[in-house]
């Protein structure tokens, strides 16, 4: 069963749903492109490692030690003071620990030379959320944009500022950036909202070569069905992250008619 939404399903952005969807989407793109790119190119799933700062961690958590101290004081009441020194009792605290996150992305490589022709990134919270993970991704992104490698950046997350800087009139829920190395500094931006189908886009290869079309909407429908999201998503409750009032009203009306 496909998603009841016409384009991106905002319920897939939930922290519990996103990791599975992200992994499946990368794999689905690779499987879809493989036959189209043979025999000159192959699609390789690579892994990036990001270290985050644990933004949701508590800096220092102090347990309730007042009762423990009171009990010890009461137990020692009336006794003779100790003559020898005793070790101070430590208090356990929680420290923010860096978290290492492994995230997949795709490389289109020329078979004869192993040269990376195109990189495909499906952005995750690690890439978009302000912090060390975003800074690491932005540095990697700048290296790609300064090279002869093309970049496709798929952003299906509404939360956090977009990685690509956009004018106000182009700020939409979702974005796909296609940066062919031969067109830089210009790039093609596919900006779309919750109510729009996910646009298909051409995959840049080497200059003058025919470009296969990537149809994310079809891939999303297949993933939704294969992963059984219809069995676990409750469309009677608001999505996470929440939608603005106007978009929430549109979503409720659409689901009432189509679900």
Image (cartoon, rainbow, N blue to C red):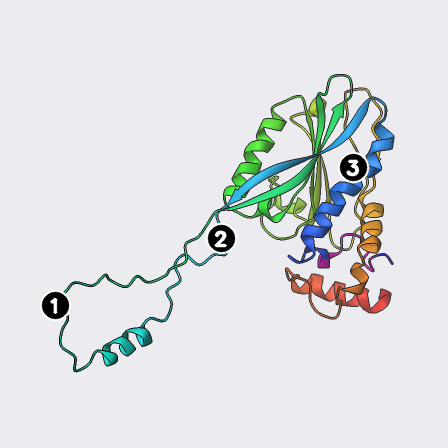
Do the CB atoms of the residues marked 1 and 3 lie less than 8 Å apart? no
Q: Quadrant of residue 253?
A: bottom right
Magenta segment, which residues?
3-11
Residue topped by disc 1: 83
Q: Is residue 99 left or right of residue 180?
A: left
Across and down, in percent, residue 17 comes to: 70, 56
In front of the other: 245 or 135: 135
Mark 2 or mark 1, earlier in chain:
2
Q: Is residue 111 above or below residue 255?
A: above
Across and down, in percent, residue 170 comes to: 67, 44
Instruction: Name the mark on residue 55.
Output: 2
Q: Is residue 36 above or below residue 127?
A: above
Q: Quadrant of residue 104?
A: top right
Specify the principal SS of the magenta part: loop
Residue topped by disc 3: 30
Pick out the residue farthest to the top: 113
């Amino acid at each position: 069963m496909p998603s009841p939404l016409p384009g991106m399903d905002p319920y897939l952005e939930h922290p519990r749903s996103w990791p599975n969807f992200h992994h499946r989407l990368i794999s689905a793109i690779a499987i879809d492109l493989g036959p189209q790119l043979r025999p000159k190119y192959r699609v390789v799933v690579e892994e990036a490692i990001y270290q985050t700062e644990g933004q949701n961690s508590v800096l220092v958590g102090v347990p309730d030690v007042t009762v423990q101290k009171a009990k010890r004081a009461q137990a020692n009441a009336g006794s003779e003071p100790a003559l020898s020194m005793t070790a101070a009792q430590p208090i356990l605290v929680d420290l923010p620990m860096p978290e290492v996150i492994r995230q997949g992305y795709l490389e289109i490589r020329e078979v004869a030379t192993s040269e990376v022709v195109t990189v495909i990134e499906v952005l995750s919270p690690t890439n978009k959320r302000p912090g060390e993970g975003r800074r690491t991704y932005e540095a990697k992104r700048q290296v790609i944009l300064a090279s002869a490698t093309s970049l496709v950046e798929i952003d299906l997350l509404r939360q956090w500022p977009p990685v690509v800087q956009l004018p106000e009139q182009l700020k939409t829920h979702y974005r796909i950036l296609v940066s062919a190395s031969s067109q830089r500094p210009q790039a093609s931006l596919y900006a779309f909202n919750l109510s729009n189908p996910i646009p298909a886009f051409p995959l840049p290869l080497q200059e003058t070569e025919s470009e296969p079309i990537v149809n994310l909407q079809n891939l999303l429908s297949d993933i939704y069905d294969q992963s059984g999201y219809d069995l676990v998503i409750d469309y009677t409750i608001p999505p996470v992250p929440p939608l603005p009032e106007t978009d929430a009203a549109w979503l409720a009306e659409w689901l009432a008619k189509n679900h």
